Amino acid sequence: MAKKKQDGENGSGLSRRRLLGAAGAAGAGGLVVGAAGGAVGASMASDDGGSGARLTSLGTTAVPFHGTRQPGITTPAQARTVLVAYDLEPGTDRAGTAALMRRWSDTAARLGRGERPDADGQVALDAGPSSLTATFGFGGSLFDKLGLADRRPGALKALPSFPDEELDATRSDGDMLVQVCGDDALVCFHAVRTLQRLARGVARVRWQMTGFTRSPGATLRPMTHRNLMGQVDGTGNPQTGDADFDAKIFIGDEGAAGGAAWARGGSYVVVRRIRMLLDAWDDLDVPAQEHVIGRRKDTGAPVTGGDERTEPDYGRRGPDGRLVIAENAHIRVSAPEFNRDATMLRRGYSYHDGFRPDGTPDAGLLFIAWQADPRQGFVPVQQKLARGDALSAFVRHETSGLFVAPPGCPEGRYVGQELLEA
């Protein structure tokens, strides 16, 4: 007689409950990354009748949802992201929003553990958690709609206009932001679809953007993201071990929080869809491209020598007396040392949405930058880039949004509870 399937088992006999247990039992043999956005993983055999099929750590890695910080900020970048902005439905009040945030938080925690949510569509039935994270943020408009203007954080204000922007208002801003990341596209879709179903009657989708980067194991060694221009992108990111990392990335001081104590420990995120003019870029030869960026295309090393992690020599001049890293080279113009130490944690993803009517690629970068205060991070850097960055001729900023992500929450509570129930 056939063995009766246990709750949550798929046809191969592998249950998501057992998957979680195997991942949790990994101990020293598994992968452990960070505490705030940590991950645990293991290689695990399935009950498949002896065929020996296995889920690798790519599928079994789980990122805890509960904690001091929300996951998806300091979590090592996963292979996929889906960004979804929501607007509250007319008539939605604070209680309705709080109930949605509780549902979202509870479900995100379960999905991150590899568990099936209630009324699951079974889209990712046979998949592991795949490093899934869901991160929630609030836009400035939410505070006005819910009568919470007096609790809006001080730095949550409309971003200024920048030269040469071509912003589409219908794909910018929003009352709420959900950032879903994971190492498997189907797992990400499942999470996005599940969260969207939970929002029915409370909030509707305003816009969605989908991005990708290198999959774990696709390269011989771990490496920084390589964007669609072929350039290594993100070398200068701050590191979690830096002495001032928390102060630069997470809201802590009175100025950034603006008296909104509930926001302390959270972070501001700027989201921009930046289309790359790839046909024009590809018309340049490699030395010209490296001159624009200030780094070698193959290794990501500064053009002054060394490897990717070598500090650029901004004062070095060539035989002709000119600066090797040009005055308008992207890395010089954007470097913290030339921007009063302005710092952001960038988690950029590429996107490709087909081709435009003129035949050029509709492709580029989903710029996602976390920071303690955008007035001291993104805004001054972007103002400088817009005035004198050689790369500006090859990109167009098409969408924009600023959100505040509340701090994380312990088990039994939900993200944003301190704001919505104060």
Image (spheres, helix red, strand yellow):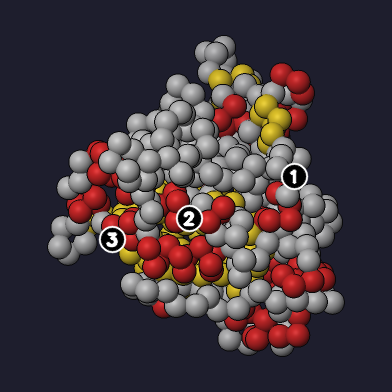
Asked whether, in this view, residue 43 is left or right of residue 282, the answer is: right
- Residue that appears at 53% across and 68% down: 379
Mark 1 and mark 3: span between their CA atoms?
36 Å
Q: Looking at the image, is 332 positioned above or below residue 218? A: below
Asked whether, in this view, residue 254 is left or right of residue 270, the answer is: right
Q: Quadrant of residue 19?
A: top right
Secondary structure under tag 1 reads loop
Asked whether, in this view, residue 141 is left or right of residue 68, the answer is: left
Name the residue type under label 2.
Ser
- Residue that appears at 54% across and 64% down: 378
Tell which of 374 and 267 is nearer to you.
374
Tell which of 195 and 399 is nearer to you.
399
Residue 203 shows in the view = no
> Which of the marked residues, 1 or 3, is nearer the chain's N terminus?
1
> Which of the marked residues, 3 or 2, is nearer the chain's N terminus?
2
- Residue that appears at 24% across and 50% down: 281
Q: State the mark number for residue 334.
A: 2
Mark 3 and mark 2: span between their CA atoms?
15 Å
Tell which of 131 and 75 is nearer to you.
75
Q: Whole-percent x and y of residue 368?
A: 52, 57
- Residue that appears at 42% across and 40% down: 316
